[in-house]
Amino acid sequence: MTPEVPPGMFVSGPLALRDAALFTDLYELTMAASYFREGMHEEPAAFSLFVRRLPPGRSFLVAAGLEDALAYLQSLRFSEAAIAYLDSLRRFPPDFLDYLRSLRFTGEVRALPEGTVFLADEPLLEVRAPAVEAQLVETAVINFCHLQTLLASKAARCVIAARGRPVIDFGLRRAHGIDAGMKAARASYIAGAVMSSNVLAGEYYRIPPTGTMAHSYVSAFPREADAFRAFARAFPDNTVLLLDTYDTLAGARTAAAVGRELEAAGRRLFAVRLDSGDVLSLSREVRRILDEAGLMSVRIVVSGGLDEMDVERFVEAGAPIDVFAVGTRMDVSADAPYLDIAYKLVSFGGRDVMKQSTGKRTWPGEKQVYRFRDTDGRYAGDLVALRDEPPPEGGEPLLRTVMEDGQPVLPGETLDAMRERCAAQIAALPEDVRRLRSGALYPVRYSERLIALTRAVEQQSGTEI
């Protein structure tokens, strides 16, 4: 039997967060206390989570992180320890703290399923709940969805660049912390990576784990050949040899000799790995050495500071690389380490609202996103509309109701289902949008009713004294 989770504890994957209700910015609590004092805390409110603009070089994003966000909302509790800490700050009145003791998330969530392709201004999710509930969860919801969406979007680009060749997540050791390393493995798998070096992700998420050897292993033996033979003895059915601890081509010749020894014993060398140097020329020379030894089935794996641009360059040059092990730059999204993601109020107490700050304007009202296809079945464009508008003909609604009354309403999805959705949606994008360097924009329109509502709300600026 699974032990009961203590009040205030949030379990995210294999990690547990004590007093998770405090995983928030202080201003969420100060606003909540003011709402409570003014008697506004139970007013219905709706918030929209979206990305204002795509990072440079990106033509689309991949939604991820919803599973954690829903788990957090379902488990939201203020423990006595959390209440005691807030009381020690001497900011909050006792009646507000008493209110927090019984607070639960009772709202509704509509969201894009994980693995869905989306664009700027399109909601990843929308929350409708009593004002304090909807406000307090802002920080956590952004945090959970931001990281995994960022990393899934980066990994999708690496998978596109590989053009069908396997991509492996190799970036755990330089991920930004334990949870980030776990979520990088999860997000990259959704985006199409086939395996991960992260063993814990293998145990928890059932992502196939993979690994070879380090240069330290090779240098621990008196000779490179000794290291290769020892590893082959330990793993005769899955031998992968790292070639570049010393001289790469000499290492390839040694690996070929070990490969022939394995074949003589009825086994087979599975792969060799390159981790440095002029990968393009080295991969060709290594392929030649292996083929001349009759080892045509041995794969070449490449790692070492790769990103999607490197992968694309090698593929376009016809490099004989079979597998790309992409690490740090994918797991930290090195070229675009954050998204301009926001969680903004779109209605309060039955009144549609919007932010009008320069460069940060929002669209008012709860929304739905519709996707259209052309006659060939490819995506032709999206329409952002108000939630209560009649569905346009031929438009596929993207936001689904995933939580009602604070409880999930759909069965949990497997990572494989999310992965299949992601692959199918990326394949359906226009070809120029999929290209890494194209800069092509996927067309997104806004409904006439949404535009009219925006103009009406603009005229009610709320600036009167």
Image (tube, grey):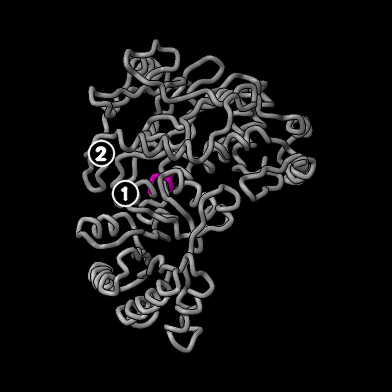
Residue 278 seen: no
Q: Main secondary structure of the magenta part?
A: helix
Question: Which amino acid type is shown beneath numbered disc 2?
Answer: Val
CA–CA distance between discs 2 and 1? 18 Å
**Direction from residue 190 to residue 350 in the image, left or right:** right
Q: Nearer the viewer, residue 99 or 388?
A: 388
Under circle 1, the secondary element is: loop
- Residue lying farthest to the top in this orientation: 390
Q: Position of residue 38 (x, y in %)?
A: 66, 23
Answer whether residue 291 is magenta in the image.
Answer: no
- Residue at image position (37%, 51%) is 336
Checking the image for residue 433, the label placed there is 2
Q: Nearer the viewer, mark 2 or mark 1?
A: 1
- Residue at image position (57%, 33%) is 412
Q: Position of residue 58 (x, y in %)?
A: 31, 44
| N-term-proximal mark, 2 vs 1 | 1
Circle 1 residue:
164
Residue range of the region highlighted in magenta in the rendering: 150-154
Q: Are marks 2 and 1 in contact (CB under 8 Å)?
A: no
Q: Nearer the viewer, residue 334 or 313?
A: 313
Q: Residues within 10 Å of mark 1 (few under 14, many from 20)?
A: few
Question: Which amino acid type is shown beneath numbered disc 1?
Answer: Gly
**Direction from residue 402 to residue 307 in the image, left or right:** left
The picture quadrant where one finds residue 441 is top left
The picture quadrant where one finds residue 94 is top right
Q: Position of residue 374 (x, y in %)?
A: 24, 24
Under circle 2, the secondary element is: helix
Q: Position of residue 178 (x, y in %)?
A: 57, 57
Q: Quadrant of the N terminus?
A: top right
- Residue at image position (65%, 32%) is 74
The picture quadrant where one finds residue 385 is top left
